[in-house]
Amino acid sequence: MTTLHRPTGLAAAFSRSVFRGEDVCAAACLPVHGAGPHPHFDDAIWDFTGVIGLPRYLARYARILSFVEILNPQWRELAKEFIFARLAPDHPAVRELAHAYRTPVLIATVHGRLTVLTGWLNWLTEQGVDNLGEVTQQHCDAYLELRKKVRDKHGVVIRDSSPGYRMDVVAAIQELGYYKELFSADGYVSAFRPWGRRTAYSVAGMVRRTGNTTPPLSNDVFQPLVAAALYVVEVLAPHVMELQQQLQEMAPNRPGRNNRERPDWRVEVVQAIDRHVQEADPFDVALDHVVAERLADGWDPDDPLLRVNLISLAHETGRRAFHYTWLPTLRGRLEEAVGEVGLSKRWGRAAALVERADGRGSVPWTLPMNTTEARLQLSRARTACLIALAALTGMRKSELAELTHDCRLPPEQLGEGRVRYRLKGKVIKGRKLGGEHDQWVTIKQAYDTAGVAASLADPVKNSGHLFKSLSFYTPYEWFLTWVNGPEGRRLGLAPIPEVPVSLRMLRRTLAVEMAHRPGGLLAAKIHLKHISVVTTEGYADPRELHQTGEKSQVASSARRPEGLQRYYELTF
């Protein structure tokens, strides 16, 4: 085997990298859109946003690798060589290395590695180390000790770091030694191996897991949570969709409203004011923080326009903002109009009645809302769709992100009173770049939820998918606050215990429910798209599985195409 010999130390600063001029995506066999960026090794920033097949859940920032944050210029080159080798292990220069990894990694993985590596290299610079040949085990131990604590931007310790993060830190430090012969500038001394022959797993103090560590939700959380989500989807959603249409009609800068021939603001805004008077339509109310800002800017507390939502008035003309330079010209007309028709929250003034969730009569589906509250109502409905789909299908975050507007396949009639509902999408985890198309058999509630999500989705921002973002923590907190607040009580929703909830926990809950039924282990394995039934056993906690004659029941279930639907019916 041929070994690459590279100079080390400061003398290597002018050595030419074997990857100089290489197309990174071509070397890593990553397909790129024709018009998309093609990062090259010499670039200081590698932009992978044009790569075809990246999962939608992967944030834009995670698709861009920036080496400029590394303080030492020669270590930027070293970091690029390391990341290139991890992305393209089949490159001739990488294949010759005895200790190099042979499997290409994902862009998300190298993004995380670069983040950790940047922290390590910059810490060395702060310690006065400008040559990796000077690094000792003491440096490694000191840096790991530092990273055992999570600190805020002021350096104050918040909590202990996770063993997984510590393992990433140790791995990044160790892996530089695997590629030292490849580096054109600097590297550890030949005899140095951080932490000797100990693995990153053991150095970080990882504990071998048994089974799945994500806990399922207890019934006192799961039941009111899913009930609230389905109430929004099945009862409130038709009204929310009507609200969405009204909001879209007044959206600023919508097509056809932004052209040079449009009337001057003096004409359009005055026309909007006159329309309020002619239709006896009260003006929208400004948010409390806007009123506070106006008072801080010197507005008179008795000003009749203090609480008028001027931005909403501008939106009525198709404009994005109201310019306060307009106010002196409009004030007289606007004060007169406000005095005549008054102020009131714009949306939901005559809301339709709906049945309360607890069956105790009917109430308006919403109280009057201003524009911001109306947009939050839309966001809340989309969150309800996400909760219901995650809970009723058990899809992973990556799979939910890939659902498109046409994900619902036509229902299949399997006999009298029996219908099979299916959703089509992609499985991302454990599959090749771009994922693999697959289908999920589900129940009618999940099928209908997908339809509601499609109606609520923004066709432009969502790029034809049900969800623009799979961010869950903050939307769920907003949803929880709404359910447990005055509006939830008014609608008869049962309160939800304030405990942590995640998409993984919803998936785990469904897995346990399905797998603990006769023959359910195989059904859960198929439905959750696990590679092995062993993974499903981990989800279901084999210590609690008590299924007599499991083999015969699994075989019987496998012979029935409708088996999975039956498990859904039994569970929900």
Image (cartoon, helix red, strand yellow):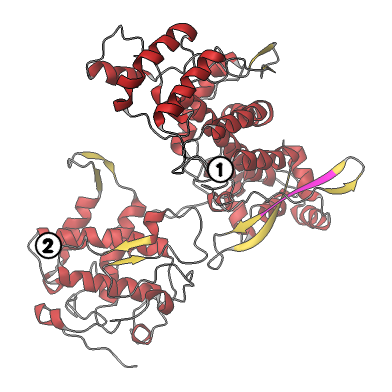
Mark 2 lies on residue: 125
Q: Quadrant of residue 199?
A: bottom left
Question: What residue is at 35 percent from the left and 76 percent from the top?
Answer: 85
Q: Amino acid at mark 2?
A: Thr
Please tell me whether mark 1 or mark 2 is closer to you in this view: 1
Magenta-colored stretch includes residue 420: yes
Image location (x, y in percent) of residue 100? 35, 78
For the magenta stretch, what is the residue range? 419-424
Disc 1 and disc 2 in contact, CB within 8 angstroms: no
Q: Secondary structure beneath disc 2?
A: helix
User: Residue placed farthest to the left in the image?
Assistant: 128
In the rendered structure, the answer to whether residue 418 lies left or right of residue 222 reads right
Image location (x, y in percent) of residue 101? 39, 75
Image location (x, y in percent) of residue 11? 10, 82
Label 1 vs 2, first from the N-terminus: 2
In the rendered structure, the answer to whether residue 14 lies left or right of residue 541 reads left
Magenta-colored stretch includes residue 206: no
Image location (x, y in percent) of residue 571? 72, 38
Q: Say whether residue 281 is visible.
A: no
Mark 1 lies on residue: 458
Q: Which mark is residue 235?
A: none
Question: What residue is at 33 percent from the left and 59 percent from the top?
Answer: 168
